[in-house]
Amino acid sequence: MKILKLIAMSAVIVMVTVGASNGAPASILTAAPAATGITTLSSTAFSSSFAFVNGMLVPSYTVPIPPITFTWSATAPAGGFYDIEITTDATLQNSADIVASSDSGHIPANSCSLPGTTTTFPTTAGELQPSTTYYIAIQAYDSTCTPGSFTTGGSGWAEYFFYTSVATPTLISPANNAVLINNLTNDNSVTPPHPFPLFYWTSVAGATSYQLQVSTTTEFTSLYLNVNVPYSSTFIDGLNTYIGYTPAADLPNNTNFFWRVEAFSSAYSPSGWSNPTSTWTFSTGNAAIPAPKAINVGNSKVTNDWTPLLRWNEIALPGGTTFSTYEVQVSTDPTFYDTTQLCFDVTSTQVPYLANQMYQGNPSNTTAQLDTQDALTAMATCPAVVTISGEKEFAPVTNFYWRVRAVDSLGTSDWSTILAFTTSYPRVDSTTFSPITGAHLTSNYQTFSWAPVSPMPQGYEIEFSLHSDFSTKDADAFVQGTSPSSPSFTPDNHNGSEGLVGGTLYWRVRAVGPYGPGLWSSGAQVITGNPPTNPGIPHPFNGAQVSSLTPTLTWTPVTVAPATTFGYYEVEVSIDPAFGTTVVDDMSSTSITTLSYTVAPALSPSTTYYWRVRACNSMPECSQWSTYYHAGKPDVFKTGP
C-alpha cells in the first residue's frame, strides 16, 4: 500500500500540507508522469455528479452512504496506472484509519491496478459514515511501473480531503402525495392524529437544529414556511424519535404544497435536503367543517352510570355540503394515540342514528348524542369493559376520555375538545349479604355485613326501606371506620338508630369515596323481629362499689310486644368492657325470669367488673344489651377488698 510506503521513505519524500500536491524529489520525478487531481465525484445517493472542490462538504443523503465514484485528471502517459487511498487520518500515516485502497488487500503487486481515470470505492455501502472528515491520496505511474517499487514511475501523492455532512432527515408526515382531510394546524388525517405535530421527520444523530421549508413550487423559490426547528422539538412516540413542527395558523384551502427538511450540526452542516431524488408534496382540501362541541358528560366528573350518554352540539355545515355521519371515540388514553386502549370508534356504520345531525333525526332535539350502551354493544372486543347481566358496561373506577368529529361530503372536521369522565366504585355484591335475603331477624340490632369492593372506598352507605323499590328511605347510615375492607353495620341507639322495626324490610349498600357514590347493590329482604324493650335502670348503679363478692344485680321490667310472649333475661359479667371474655355468661340460660340475678361463683376482690342484661321473648327475639349511663358502654361496678 502506497501510504505505508510513504512512511517508509519519509526521509526521501517531503509531504506538504493537506490540500496541496505532494511531489517526490527531483531525481524521482525525472521522466515521471505529472501528479494527478480529483475532478468529480458521484454516487447513487446523489441526484447528480459534484465538481470536486478540495475541502468540500459531501451531503449524506442516505445512511449507510453508498460507494462514491471518483474521477481524476488523466496525467499518466499511455499505458500508465493510478493508485488512490482514503483514510480518516490527516497525517496519512496510520494504517488503522485506512477506509479504502485501490491496491486490493494492500498488496504491492496491486499498486498499479488502475489503468483508467475513474474508480468506485469503497465497494461496500456503509464504509463511509456521516459527520466525518476523509483524506484522499492519489498518484500516477507510467507504463514501466514495477510492482513494489515506489521509485519507478511514481508521480508523488496529491492529497485532498472532504467532509460528509450530518445525515439527512427522512420525512414522515404529511406523507408524500397526502391529501389533508382538513387544513388545521394539527390535521386529523395524519397517522397517528393528535397530539403529533402536523410536520414531523426522523431525528438525526448529532443534529442541533433543522430547517423546514414549505413551498408552492418544486424549486422552493416561493416559501410559505421557512422555519428553523430546534433539536428541543424532539418527541418520542414510544418506538421512534422524531422532530416536529406545527404552524401557528391553519394552512390555506385547496393548495398544493411541497416540503423538505435539512439538518444542521456544529461541524458538519448542512445535511442534504431530504428526499433528493423526489420532492414530497401534499395538498389541502376545501373549507373544513367545524368541530362539534362536546357538552357532556361533565368533564372529569365521577359518574355511577357505567354507560353514560354523550352529547354535543350539532354543527353548522358549509354551504353546498351534505352531512354524512358523526364519529365518536372513547379511550382510556387521554392522547388517543395508543390504539390498544381504544374502547370504541363508531360511526353510523355501527350506530345508525349517528348519520343524523340531531339525535334520532328529531328536529326538536337541539343536540346530537350517543348512548354508549349502543356503541359497546356494537363492538366485538373492547378493553376496560365489564359484562353485567349480559350487558356491556364501562369498567368501574376508571378514567375515560371521549371526543367526536363530523364527516360531510367534503371531508372530516377536527376532533372536538377531549372530555373525561370517571366511573364510580362497582356495585356491592348482594349475594354476599349477611343476613341473607328472606332471613328472620332475632334482634332488631342485627349486624349487617357484605363483601368489600375494590379499590377500597372511604366507606359505605346502607339504606333501609319498607318498599322494595326504595321509594322511601326509612333508615340509613354511613359506615366509615379504620377497616372498611371488612364492612359491617350494627344499628343501635347510640349511632342514630333505635333498631329496625316494621316487619318486612329491604336493605341495600353502596360504596362512597373519591370514586363515588357507587351504584346501589340489589336490595335484600329481611323480616324484623318484635323483641321486648330494653331492661331499665340497673343496680348497682354505674361506678358503684359493692361489699359482696356475690352481688345481686337488678333491673326494671320490660314491655313485651303484642302477639309475643316473654321468655327470659340474659346476663353477662366481665372484666373486659368489650366482653371478649366473660366471668358470668348466662346467654344460654333461659331460667332468669325475675328482675334480679345473684352473681355466682364469687368474684375477685378489688376488681372492676362490667355487666349488662337484655330481654328475650319466646321466639327468641332479644332486645339490645343494656347501656344506661356510660355513653354506649356497659355499666361498671367495683368489688371491695
Image: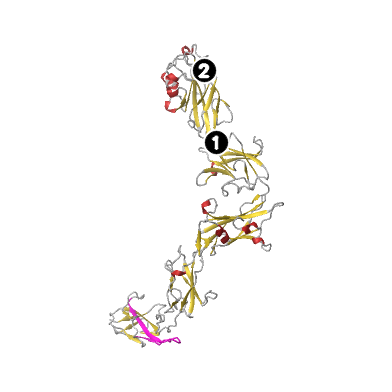
Q: Give the percent coordinates (x, y) of residue 143.
A: 49, 14
Q: Is residue 615 left or right of residue 205?
A: left
Q: Which residues are magenta?
A: 553-575
Q: Give the percent coordinates (x, y) of residue 19.
A: 52, 23
Q: Quadrant of the C terminus?
A: bottom left
The answer to whether residue 460 is magenta is no
Between residues 237 and 617, which one lies in front from this camera angle? 617
Position above or below: 480 against 111: below
Which mark, residue 35? 2
Between residues 541 and 432, which one lies in front from this camera angle? 432
Q: Residues within 10 Å of mark 1 (few under 14, many from 20)?
A: many
Which mark, residue 210? none
Q: Quadrant of the N terminus?
A: top left
Label 1's element?
A: loop
Q: Residue at x 62, y 45 (%)?
A: 247
Position above or below: 389 against 342: below
Q: Report the residue marked by disc 1.
A: 168
Q: Residue at x 53, y 61 (%)?
A: 392
Q: Is residue 462 visible?
A: no
Label 2's element?
A: loop
Which amino acid type corresponds to the residue marked 2 in the rendered image? Ala
Position above or below: 528 against 461: below
Q: Give the percent coordinates (x, y) of residue 174.
A: 60, 43
Q: Residue at x 58, y 27 (%)?
A: 49
Residue 61, picture quadrant: top right
Q: Residues within 10 Å of mark 2 (few under 14, many from 20)?
A: many
Q: CA distance from mark 2 to mark 1?
A: 35 Å
Q: Is residue 252 left or right of residue 134?
A: right
